[in-house]
Amino acid sequence: MSRFISRRPNALAILALVVLWLLFFWRLYTPTLADRVFITQSDFSSQYYNFSAYQARRFDAGSLFPAWNPYNYGGSPFLADPQASVAYPVRWLFLALYGGGRWSYAALEAEVMAHFLLTSLLVYVLARRITGGALGGLISAIAYTYGGYLNSYPIQQVTILASGTWLPLTLLGIHLGTERGSSTRWGWLVVAGVGLGLIVLGGHPQIAMLCGYFCVAYLVFRVYTGSRSWRDLIMGGALFVLVGSGLAAIALLPTAEFQQLATRATDLNYASKAGGYPFTDLTQIVWSTATNLYAPLYIGIAGIALAVIAVAYSRARALFWAVAGVVALLLSFGGQTSLFQFLYVLLPGVSLFRDQERAIMLWSFCMSILAGIGAARLIQGLGADEQKRLRYGLYAILAVTVAYSLILYSGTTGVKNTALQVVVFDGLVMALSAYLLPWVARCPEQRQGALVALLVFDLFSLTQSGPAFSPGSPDTQLPEAPWMADMRPLLAADPFARIDGTDKLGPFGTLFALPTIRGTGPLHLAGTDRLLNLPASKTWDLLAVRYVISGEASLPVPSKRLKDVSDWSGQYAVYELEKPGPLARLIYAADVIPNDDYAAQVMAAPDYPLDGKAVLPQPPPLALGGQRPDEASVTLTEIGPERLRLRASTSANALLLVSMPYHPGWKASTGGQALTVVRADLGLLAIPLPVGQYDIALDFNPTSIQIGKLVSGITLIVTVLLLGGWIVAWRRNRPLFTQPTKETD
């Protein structure tokens, strides 16, 4: 066995990571229902499962890039929503594996599990290269993958997990692409670009920004400590950034456009962005969940001890990771430190995001790499004095832990008993670490397994049964309510009608394919948000609502009670409005109000005639007479996710007001001729129509998506060619790019 370990350390480490992965998640896939758990409902269910279910239906129908979601907020951009991860290749893989209508809650759980395995393997390869040994790679992979960070909110917020998965691949490309004398360095920088593209396509812009800056910092560090050539820095940085941004253009360009139209476009003040962890959460580094249900700062007692060894005894190798980790930790406190204030002003992109605690990802990553470096240093052997200092340091922390336990036990802090249990368990792990780490250092060749076992015992005990999981089967989650079955034939009879599901449908219109005017996701169109803030009767009329699901005894407008419902959420009813607003109408008068806040006040007035006037932010391109002709008519003929077909006839200039959320990506045409589309009534689209008869086609096909597809397609082809040539040159053991000789110059 020892001979196998010495000859096949990488194979053994990878096998260990696969086995640990299977053991960690066994309760998610066990056939024994009494032992099953599922990923707890929250953002995982209300947003990510919602979006993935819609994408699965469109994928099965042959649409790889669905651009519009008609079931969210009365209609919203889908490809442009970064957290839908529409263009993410790993999502496509799982949609194909679970195709044919088999997408489920468990399918998305399988995608999450796959990212954990990918993360552990990629961190291993990177750390193996940095530390120079399989043990260092294995320790780093375990500390990061099964530590407190990755098993806190990234499990629930799938895009954070997906984007972060590809950070080690990007860093590996940078690391190998900046080695001195490397003949294949440009190829590795292309690999780094692929990793950067996957980070962006993973779907979380804030994580992508943090990873992007982190990777650029690592590139600068590697060039500064290596070739010290500005040419290498500029050309290498340009290569990996261009490849990454080019591959991700299909998502980047539509998202940038969506951001300008979304509610967060007007929420750029410092106070809303300065939130972060409280300083008390620093105790998580040692006492895991004593102050919180999650412990994103925790990488294990042994992990922290090994990170300290790295900083103390491998300073050159540990320098970047130690400094970057501390910077990330300080940034995670948000506006409580001056660092965030400086970055908010000086660094592009920082002012776009809230929840600065997400920077803790980089702390966890850096500490895990340091733990691997420390493990590599430990097995080289520590002197007697070094072992003594290590043991005494751990015993000192243990003494503080015991004192803290006594304070908690006395009840003077008012902390619940669960905190005491956490601190006592961590004290036990400290005692084991204080004994085992010096013991491993005395005979490292035969005792490496004990180090791995200690770290696994510590982390699995904390995270394997954490609050991210709940007992039960995923098959029982989010069942369809009985009233939904009754609603479907009604919607089939009138496919142009919408629903206000209120809190009884909540964010799940997308999941159940019900066209609700409410929805989910951090980004939604600002115009829709303004419409939803009008009085209910006004909102329903403008957004063509016909059915309302409500717990109220009656509605503020004439309606018919179709069905009484009683379930786990209480008693409520399904109502049909007697005079629902149409999806399209002809308007012959308009008020021009440039200020949307004032326009909302005017429209909210009880006597404002929504059916006879439109509110425009600027004068219409044609004169409106103010009187509706008797023969004016609009007929809807077809509706689809990204299209609407209708006929209109008018003997006077008119505005065709369509109850579709306004987005410049909606294009209107008649007989092959383009029609102008303008914004009206705060957030709807309108088409100015001169006198005549029209067969109108409305299609959602933003220019940003067209350009994004073109750029990503070209970049993909160029990247494949570059990587193909690089692999051929690598196998021939010669540089991919060579300096021209005099004969070929």
Image (tube, grey):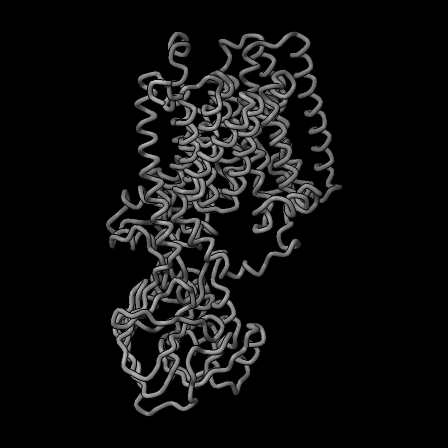
Expressed as whole percent of the image width and height from the top left, the position of residue 694 reads 27, 78
Q: Residue at x 60, y 38 (%)?
A: 289
Judge whether 152 appears above or below 570 on screen: above
Expressed as whole percent of the image width and height from the top left, the position of residue 536 reads 49, 76
Q: Residue at x 55, y 83 (%)?
A: 605
| Image quadrant containing the N terminus | top left
- Is 638 in front, or is 183? 183
Judge whether 664 appears above or below 103 on screen: below
Relative placement, left or right, of 668 versus 352 is left
- Residue 692 visible, this orientation: yes
Q: Quadrant of residue 199?
A: top left
Judge whether 225 appears above or below 693 on screen: above
Q: Residue at x 57, y 14 (%)?
A: 378
- Is 287 in front, or is 491? 491
Q: Quadrant of residue 35?
A: top left
Q: Quadrant of residue 685?
A: bottom left
Expressed as whole percent of the image width and height from the top left, the position of residue 738 reads 38, 21
Judge whether 231 appears above or below 6 on screen: below
| Image quadrant containing the C terminus | top left
- Is 352 in front, or is 62? 352
- Is 336 in front, or is 552? 336
Expressed as whole percent of the image width and height from the top left, the position of residue 225 reads 57, 21
Q: Residue at x 55, y 18 (%)?
A: 375
- Please give the count of numbered marks on the rendered protein: 0
Relative placement, left or right, of 406 versus 226 is right
- Residue 561 visible, this orientation: no
